[in-house]
Image (spheres, coloured by chain):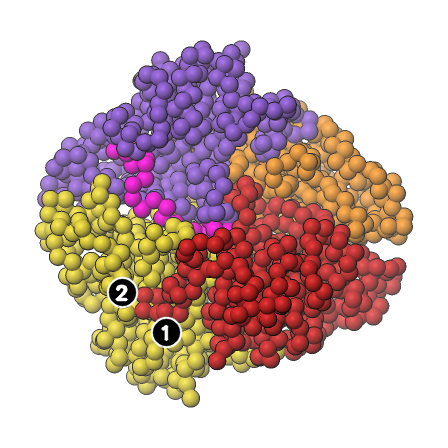
Chain colours: A purple, B orange, C red, D yellow
Amino acid sequence: MGIPVGVIGASGYAGGELLRLLTGHPVFDLSYAAASGRTHGEQDPALVSVHPSLRAGEADHRMGEGLRLSRVSATEAGRRCAAVFLATPPEVSAALAESLLDAGVEVVIDLSPAFRLRDPGLQRRWYPDVRRRGDHDAVCGLPELNRGALADARLIAMPGCLATAAILALLPLCGLPDLALTGIVIDGKAGSTGSGDRLRRSALHAARSGVVGPYAPAGHRHSAEIREALQARGLTTVGGALRLGMSVFAVNLVRGVSITAHVLQDPAADKTGDVDLTQLFRQAYRDEPFIRIRDWAAEAVPLPDPRIVLGSNYCDVAAFRDADANRLVIIAALDNLIKGAAGQAVQACNIRFGLPEVTGLAALPVYPS
Amino acid sequence: MGIPVGVIGASGYAGGELLRLLTGHPVFDLSYAAASGRTHGEQDPALVSVHPSLRAGEADHRMGEGLRLSRVSATEAGRRCAAVFLATPPEVSAALAESLLDAGVEVVIDLSPAFRLRDPGLQRRWYPDVRRRGDHDAVCGLPELNRGALADARLIAMPGCLATAAILALLPLCGLPDLALTGIVIDGKAGSTGSGDRLRRSALHAARSGVVGPYAPAGHRHSAEIREALQARGLTTVGGALRLGMSVFAVNLVRGVSITAHVLQDPAADKTGDVDLTQLFRQAYRDEPFIRIRDWAAEAVPLPDPRIVLGSNYCDVAAFRDADANRLVIIAALDNLIKGAAGQAVQACNIRFGLPEVTGLAALPVYPS
Amino acid sequence: MGIPVGVIGASGYAGGELLRLLTGHPVFDLSYAAASGRTHGEQDPALVSVHPSLRAGEADHRMGEGLRLSRVSATEAGRRCAAVFLATPPEVSAALAESLLDAGVEVVIDLSPAFRLRDPGLQRRWYPDVRRRGDHDAVCGLPELNRGALADARLIAMPGCLATAAILALLPLCGLPDLALTGIVIDGKAGSTGSGDRLRRSALHAARSGVVGPYAPAGHRHSAEIREALQARGLTTVGGALRLGMSVFAVNLVRGVSITAHVLQDPAADKTGDVDLTQLFRQAYRDEPFIRIRDWAAEAVPLPDPRIVLGSNYCDVAAFRDADANRLVIIAALDNLIKGAAGQAVQACNIRFGLPEVTGLAALPVYPS
Amino acid sequence: MGIPVGVIGASGYAGGELLRLLTGHPVFDLSYAAASGRTHGEQDPALVSVHPSLRAGEADHRMGEGLRLSRVSATEAGRRCAAVFLATPPEVSAALAESLLDAGVEVVIDLSPAFRLRDPGLQRRWYPDVRRRGDHDAVCGLPELNRGALADARLIAMPGCLATAAILALLPLCGLPDLALTGIVIDGKAGSTGSGDRLRRSALHAARSGVVGPYAPAGHRHSAEIREALQARGLTTVGGALRLGMSVFAVNLVRGVSITAHVLQDPAADKTGDVDLTQLFRQAYRDEPFIRIRDWAAEAVPLPDPRIVLGSNYCDVAAFRDADANRLVIIAALDNLIKGAAGQAVQACNIRFGLPEVTGLAALPVYPS
């Protein structure tokens, strides 16, 4: 007797990953899959012809021809699902979430940025074209930040993949007194699935392969999420608000995100020079099943690296001190389609329904690959 | 109350994959791991420091500091394990298998080529330096070929990754009368993990990245296995023995193997021109949980492709007819560390112990990645 | 006092490569560049904004803002150019070549397949949608095959990249008596620039990266060119016409093509068993500046490999014998945008205008890269 | 009548690139090549068997069997060469430079870090194992910084690839008053050729492919060079010396380096808010043949990117302002084997001998590749 769930936006990369994880989930039953681009037709395609990697073996019928990609219908989703995952563009999510809740869906988990920012002014500045419908307050879906609030949430806004990595890198610093921050720079490196499957010339293999392409030197939208989340936890730079900038590079990965948080301190005022950073991070995340703190003394290869979390819901984190530059260097890496999207959404949904948090998410990384 | 198993050769790529699969296996208990290169020291390293991808989350203790990499000891393995997987070089396997059986291990599953060839003359020609110790007859571990013989095997010889793909590509042709073969050419493409982690200049990233490198234009050792297995099933070329050649290329993959079997027919004698190849293959493999027959009419991307099986125990197969050249083209792709090594070994071991064949091997491919 | 030349189709990959080579050519003056997709507008874009890799340094004005991407005009091309390179789709080339010649262009060098096949029946079968205009006979532009006929050509049809590699691999066999061929299989591996920059989902980085994708298991259009060229030089299989099939795979390269010609012989009739293949090939190509015969005894890495010709006009070739399978294995690799397209077109144009064949093409490969 | 030059350390990646550039150089004659690892043997190997990419075509004898890889001999080098390039480890360079000068070599151009740091204290701290022999003062070989001093140099110390990129990114800021810097962070991304061809497990393709591996989170040795060079030009942070930290990541490139200089300013004191950065950089580099300032308004793809300089001696630079974080973002990309090593060394040697600076270095980037 599983809990029936659905996926809207099931034809894209994050949607496909949700299908994969839900197919292997022991409690959630995938009972509805739809894509917003689909028009009403005579014949809905089988999910396995849209996502041929998910086809079962000849003698196995887990996901045979049965499940099909429907057109989007809030009514239908409401009839079939207790929970619906939205892997849709923000404009679509902003409009759809309310309809789904009205149609009787218990909880909507939105992977888009539609509901992420709490401050209406920030929302207008960063997402001027996204008009939220309804007055449901969204709850941030990052378990490590907000686990307690998920139990009775109706609308859960999952953070972006870069924001997840950056917030997890910086969260343990939030309680630290006398850090004397003068500025934080996030340098992000991202694989191609993070940009979705929209057709554009710069996304072609011949154009995108082998790049170290600065696609957002400044002003990436995730920087607003990161600032809002961390300021809410008390992280500030000397003299006022949090000065945090982010630059993001496309690198030659399909899957995976790595961020480096360069944390600059005022050498005159910093009193944290003898804090053992690895211990601080271990302590902060001691109850977390999906955070792994890396300690260079024990590792065979340079870590964190998105390769070494690939296929898993882990976020690897390591912290370093650069005494020459009064700088802390915190690196976090995750699989952008799992801990940065579908996996973390399932994790949040597990919490929402009172299941053990790791249910369906225990896969170890597929390495080397 | 699981079945205790061990891995010798646990520090390499196939060894690490065995550790990963066994950690997630619901019946086999990983109770011993050793590496043949390890010398006796004061302190055995933790497995997770040798394979940092396998480290558990901060709040999870599946594979914490507990399991360590021991030095190789047949006695110790015999005391602790019902089954032992050997991911060792053929010279080591050839000597070790008997000691393990003598020490009380119920079954040894060898991933090396030490015991693959049945004909002693072929063995001497292709592996002159490998001296098998003992008189245990090895059973071929390819389930699709030899499932029945695995139930009471004591020594199981797993086929090579290229051989697995090639045999699975050609097996359905074995029963076909009037095929009038004039020759078969296997063109293989292989990722870098297939060559192990031995240090050599040609294996460096700067040398190996981006190659289409013909590392075995002719005379690859897997070709002997393939010929022996197929001839035993009655596949021959017109006029006598099986004329089958293989050329293998290093390509820019870490994981994955693809082979193309180009099957040439005598146009005058061939009477199979109206056989529906896809149906033939579907029928041949209708009871197989890990074979997926691909039909271009239903696929979104060109298949089979090793990418689309990555992280899974699937072997994808598709067959085409080239009327212009009296040629069948059969393509097979698999993950060389799973269906080509560790996964197939676990599959054989499942059969050996009467477990459902898919136990611990149900993971769907991680795609795209 | 250079020879003025133009490029039509200058916005694509082959077009960009023509611009690069012509910019560095000491005799040809790039005096016209156009793209068929361009509409007439107020302002033509600078070539360096379409191809930012070609921008000159701050203090260098080789290709500054001067050259612009015009709309296509045969009249304009005729006024400005002695020779025009067409890097356009075959439908466009088929219509444009005659207009250019009529407008006074001395020679048109077409990189598309529009004029490649000589047999009208083959042309109709393989390119049903390409209607050649005019009655100009095209001359095949492969210098190693057809150097003599280029000196007074008006319309030169450059062979495809795979066809160039395959013909160069097989040409030295053409004169060989008693070869007793029973069939030839070409297994091709190709990078993504070979398919052009048309937008389609399967060409996205996330879809195309890391593939070994059989995009043409049989029936690739280049196979018709290859058969026609080799049959014209007398290569046949026992019992009649040339049985030659080709299968082509997309691999994880941007630039580069590798083909393997698997040449099967009748063991009873073959009398070439003691031919020294490397010597045969060295002899056949002893006057060729752009062919390099590879001998495994002398090479540090497995060759031929498209990596090791990257950035150059070389085609590397090596031949092997597989006695176990009565098979010759001939491997050829080239840079598909240079020897497979733009470079070879410049080479043909050099010959056409009586220049030393290597003019502007002397760059050594950029390796490793 | 060329100028005879030699390369010591000719078997590695930078050595091979020197051979390639010198083979195509119209004035320098490559007359000696040696490798420090070579022992005296009966037969020195041909250079083309060590670097098979450099082999000439069958009918071309530029670099046939003639040039061989000798053992290292300062006497021999002195007899044959006016200039010697050292692509050797720093310990070797430190000892060899003096012997070469004593043997009559006019100028030694060292690509290692042996002679880079001027301050003896810094040298002892960062290179404790490198003992410089002799009392020759080395001149920094970065032309854009130090062109004037090269004309009569006897010992030229080429900067590292990351240092070249970082210094070129920051140099235009050196003259700027009221910048009110509070700190600079360099985030570097580097390909595998930058680490040389030493055998180690982490450099294997299977281990290094697909990484975003933080191999130097802090304390990279190039950071000392960068600080010394920029402080000498007057760049400081508020309150004293230059606070500059660097973190370097291995990324999935063979060739290429990208650095991002995140420049943090004190929002209260900064008076540069209305400076047009692109104009500032254009002006600073207006006489430079190998610097290209990128302006996002004119580019088709995100730049600078090491892909788009590959095969050339260009360094691409772009500057951005992040008003949200009081930050300047300056990105520089280069080919680490050319502008980051061999090409820049040839550029410096051109200046030393009074040749036009671009001699032999005019190749445009090979893109896309």
Question: Which percent across, then down, holds residue D38?
Answer: 46, 72
Which secondary structure, mark 2?
A: loop
Q: Which mark is residue D358?
A: 1
Location of residue D28 with respect to C240 vertically, above or below: below
Q: In which quarter of the image is the N terminus of chain D?
A: bottom left
Location of residue B293 with respect to D250 vertically, above or below: above
Q: Which mark is residue D285?
A: 2
Which secondary structure, mark 1?
A: loop
Q: Earlier in the sequence, mark 2 or mark 1?
A: 2
> Of the residues shown, which amino acid type is indicated by label 1?
Val
Q: Is residue A208 magenta?
A: yes
Residue at 53%, 36% in the rendered image = B367
Q: Give the range drawn in magenta.
A: A206-227
Query: Observer-nearest residue: D80 or C54?
Result: C54
Question: Which percent across, then down, holds residue B142?
Answer: 69, 37
**Would residue C318 be seen by someone viewing this image from the given angle?**
no
Residue at 34%, 80% in the rendered image = D355
Of marks 2 and 1, the one in the foreground: 2
Location of residue A153 with respect to C312 vertically, above or below: above
